[in-house]
Amino acid sequence: MTCLHVAIIGAHARYLVNFRSPLMQAIKAYGHEVSALAPDFDDETRSELRAIGVQPVDISLSRTGMNPLRDLRDIIGLHAHMRRLKPDAVLAIAMKPAIYGILAAAIAGLPRRFALIAGLGYVFSEGRSLRDRIVQMISRQLCRLALRRAEVVFVQNPDDADELAALDIVWRDRIVRVNGTGVDLIAWPQMDLPPPPVTFALVARLLAEKGVREYVAAARRVKARHPEVRFLLLGWIDARPSAIGEAELASWVADGVVEWPGYVDVQPWLAQTSVFVLPSYYREGVPRSTQEALAAGRPVITTDSPGCRETVIPGENGFLIPPRDVDSLAIAMLHFVENPQQVCVMGYNSRRLAEERFDVRAINERMLSAMELDRTGLPDQADGQPATRQQQAP
């Protein structure tokens, strides 16, 4: 048995630190070495990874957009890193790292390649312009080219598994479904509910497709009847074209519709929250922010759309509403304002759901088992080929 070197490729250094440290620590706990490859490292993120025994590696990778020359240069750069590091296994997380990371690993001749698609996102959304449709068509072809070279493709909800299989992008028997990123249920205990008034919170990047404008529109309607109700908007302005602009955001704050403290540590603000809201119509995996709200014991209002619907049992721990439906969102909010006892009942059920579905330890163990990393190393193979494994259907 030998120790393996696992390379994890992400689209952003801070994402790997915040959301994938438990996974990297789980791999380390089995005696393997881990390198984390991402753009945008700084002294803080490097130090945080080194503190848990993970080696940070700077790469060039554009998180959004499609520039053929830049993307080709990034693949060449990733290939050079693969040749230098010579990892035994590669796990690429998110769509763009999966496409370019898996291709680079395949070109470098690395046999054990894995991908995690945490939501189909822009590539599988409905393109509104001719340019969008062309970019999406090219991206889907690249996705097929790359993901067919992965030993396992992890997805986070059944809709994504069905679509990838139906479009013949990934073979069904190579898809393994996991319940999102997961939450450390010890670090995220159930919190006491705040005193009145009822307070709603949306936690997300401030993008139109996250339902931010629908949230604000519904907040206006609720405050017209119950001006004491608070609405928190917790997130940061993104660089994407669909991002909410600073001027629009400032006008909402000036009108007294929402409170926006900016980019903050979410946990203390969830302690002030009665009900969590995410009216997203983005192609989510399973939103991490919602999983944290469930762990904190907060009812959830979200959309009946891929990924989001996995976090709510309607009528038990919250409500599912149609995407882009301000009327339904306002009605669901008013239910909690006018029936505040439901906040406690549904919040308790949310915590139970987090324990059943979203324990990060159980999710990580499922991933490590599928990659055969849940033990120290693999038996040496006489022919130099990786050990075979039984494929798992979602």
Image (tube, rainbow, N blue to C red):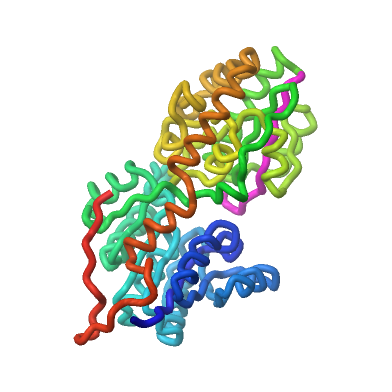
Counting labels gives 0
Q: Quadrant of the N terminus?
A: bottom left
Q: Which residue is nearer to you in this view: 295 or 11?
A: 295
Residue 158, located in which quarter of the rendered image? top left
Q: Is residue 87 visible?
A: yes
- Residue 271: x and y in percent read 70, 37
Q: Is residue 96 above or below residue 80?
A: above
- Left or right side of 193 for 62: left
- Left or right side of 50 for 150: left
Q: Which residue is nearer to you in this view: 343 or 114?
A: 343
- Residue 36: x and y in percent read 52, 72
- Residue 30: x and y in percent read 44, 71
Q: Is residue 37 above or below residue 188?
A: below
Q: Is residue 132 visible?
A: no
Was residue 192 drawn as part of the magenta stretch in this picture?
no
Q: Main secondary structure of the magenta part?
A: loop
Residue drawn at point x = 23 percent, y = 47 percent: 166
Residue drawn at point x = 33 percent, y = 67 percent: 372
The magenta region covers 228-241
Q: Is residue 65 above or below residue 194?
A: below
Q: Residue furthest left?
A: 383
Q: Which residue is nearer to you in this view: 359 or 234?
A: 359
Q: Residue furthest right?
A: 254
- Left or right side of 69 for 259: right
Residue drawn at point x = 45 percent, y = 84 percent: 85
Was residue 232 drawn as part of the magenta stretch in this picture?
yes
Q: Which residue is nearer to you in this view: 40 or 22?
A: 22
- Residue 228: x and y in percent read 76, 19
Residue 150, located in which quarter of the rendered image? bottom left
